[in-house]
Image (cartoon, coloured by chain):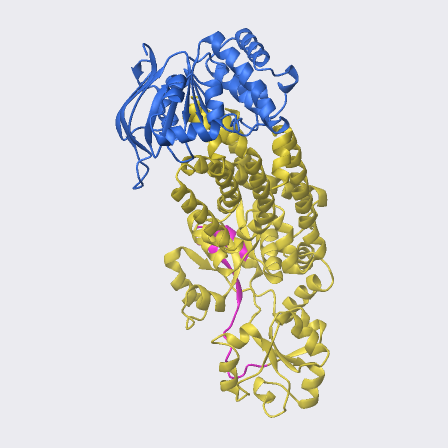
Amino acid sequence: MKWPIFLVWLLLAGPSWAAEPIRVASKNFNESYLLAEMLARLLEDAGYSVERRFGLGGTLICFEAMINDEIDLYVEYTGTLAQTILGRPQLVGQNALNTALASRNIELLDPIGFNNSYAIAVRRALADALGLVTIGDLAGHGLKIAVSHEFLERADGWSGLAARYGLPPRVQGIEHGLAYQAIAEGAIDVMDAYSTDGELQRYDLKLLADDRGYFPRYLAAPLVREDLPEPVKAVLNRLQGRLDDVQMQTLNAQVVFDGRSFAEVADAFLVENGLTTAHSEAIDLWQSIGHNTLQHLKLTFIALTTAIIVGVGLSLLVFRSRGTARIVTYLCGLLQTIPAIALLALMIPLFGIGPVPAIVALCLYALLPVVRNTLTALTTVDPTLIQVAVGIGLTRRQRLRYLFLPLALPSMLAGIRTAAVICIGTATLAAFIGAGGLGDPIVTGLALNDTGLILQGAIPAAVLAMFTEFAFEGLERLLLPGHLRRANRSE
Amino acid sequence: MTDTCVEFVAVSKSFGTEARVLDDVHLRLPTSATTAIIGESGCGKTTLLQHINALLDPDHGQIKVLGAPIPADRIAFRRRIGYSVQGAGLFPHMTSRENIVLLARLEGWTAGAIEQRYQALIAAMGLSGDVSGRYPSGLSGGQQQRVGLCRALMLRPRLLLLDEPFSAIDPITRADIYRHFQQVQQQEGISTILVTHDMREAVRLASWLVIMRHGRILQSASAATVRAAPADDYVARLLAEQLA
């Protein structure tokens, strides 16, 4: 009877569930991490306890999480809010947006200052040579224009811009990550960019003025739950007007190019500008790896245990009926075809964000190998043996206990082993919905292009997967008599 | 025939829409003797056998086993009847000993009683002690069949059903198993019903013969009667061909 208690302990233990701190989230790109860290620091400096749920996988996940009271705040952009979230692009300005948000108990605080919008960039030398100032000046120079695929497709992307400024309607598409390299080397002359990209300074690019007001404004501001205490909102508003486009570019560049951590850059900015009094302590590397590994183990262990109980139980229920067994296997297979990241996202409306939806998703993922292997093994037991088992007078239960289960065990163990390794791998994606674990440094590292950070998650995850393989090999040696092991291996 | 161990009255059976596998079978088999049920593949002999330990239920007719209709508690009923099949049907994940003593353990026999019966049986069936710890995959075909017979005999059944248990074994080994088996059978006074397609085996082991064809009983009589007065041409031909 100690098992359930242990599981509950696993669920409840750990710092992330202890107190009731203010939950600060970020999306999974550099600027969002930086701003979220600044807000978190400001709150900590003012004496609040903060829980960081950084690196959530996108706008809708963040907003859903806020609606479901899973997080208290993150930094959003006015344009994104109006278009993507509210679907009303005509809404402009803090007041108009807040009126629209009031019914959802969400509030947009004061803008931080900069406008991270789409922009059109050219090499500064080229701009000076040709006297390019506005986007309209591009016309008639025969310049090589290439824009990101997304910008090319978007309704508010290139086609509208070209029409507004009289530019060629069809231009080349290019992967955004490669565009900076291409423009620096002169392979292209004009590209789309985000106006606060750190690369703009690094490659000495000039943004052309949008004098005909084509691009919507993407002013960054803290988006918070309305029920946060007023003093907390006041602390968050201390960032109001503190960062313009160029300053934001500089901070972004410090993370992307100078190899400094976003926490370090955020901290330095706050102290230099007198927004916080003291530097915060750096987090110990091993402590954070240990913490993430433990969280990762919790996620996989609970998910796997549940999948084994549900999967084996389900298989035992249905294996006697060939039709039902087929349907169950098929349904489990269907679950497997949902991409992991989509399955995680689908869990959010049902379970919010955090460990619970991640565990449910992992469990669904682990179900197929367990169910398929168990069912296959149970349904392929030699019919002669079944006939003998009935004929010599074994009860249904005894047939299960002395015939079906022992014969199915090798295949079941192999399925569980596969499920365990899948779980460990897939659990790294759980960080996208704020479940923590070894995916945390991986997601952050991916967003920040920080290989060191990625390895902090990837290496322990690989070690865990290997360790699991070894553990199962040992378990098989322990549980299976020699001849069944041999049979299993030759399969 | 005074005592009957098995009695069929007007038993019919068919699977799905196919022709009857058992067609109006009337049968009385003697106690404490060996009966052989003989016929070609598909004649219904295995189906008939599986009605005796209630692996199959008849569509029509009544069956009495050991003097009574088949009771509701089929588990206890089947444990009073020994059962062994071609290839022995040993559980591959259990050692020989585990296979043999499984039912005695489930019946709650003491360790002492189990050990005593086990040792007596393997000795009687001509098995050496070193097969005890081996898995079926490590046994020869003859050893497997002996272990299968030991398992069928473990609970001291009054009735033993054997479905072609000797057909995949070489003649020399087979003769040795016959000898051991017949000793045990006589010592314990077991009624045996043996399904076989081999007339030689039938007359070697059985005192009562049942000859089947197309789901019907052609003749059910003592071996001597069948040999002296075959019921029809088919039986006569079967005897002539196989015993020549």
Q: In what quadrant of the picture does the C terminus of chain A appear?
A: top right
Residue A446 on the magenta span: no
Chain A palette colour: yellow
Q: Is residue A324 left or right of residue A10?
A: left
Q: In this picture, is A278 found above or below B15?
A: below
Residue A416's spot in the image, x, y percent?
Answer: 56, 39
Number of numbered tags placed on the structure image: 0
Quarter of the rendering containing residue A188 = bottom right
Quarter of the rendering containing residue A395 = top left
Q: In this picture, is A74 found above or below B216?
A: below
Chain B palette colour: blue
Residue B206's spot in the image, x, y percent?
Answer: 44, 18
Query: In the rendered structure, which segment of residues is drawn in magenta?
Result: A209-236
Q: Residue at x 72, y 58 (%)?
A: A260
- Between A421 and A83, the one lying in front of the other is A421
Viewer can see residue A151 = yes
Residue B232's spot in the image, x, y percent?
Answer: 34, 29
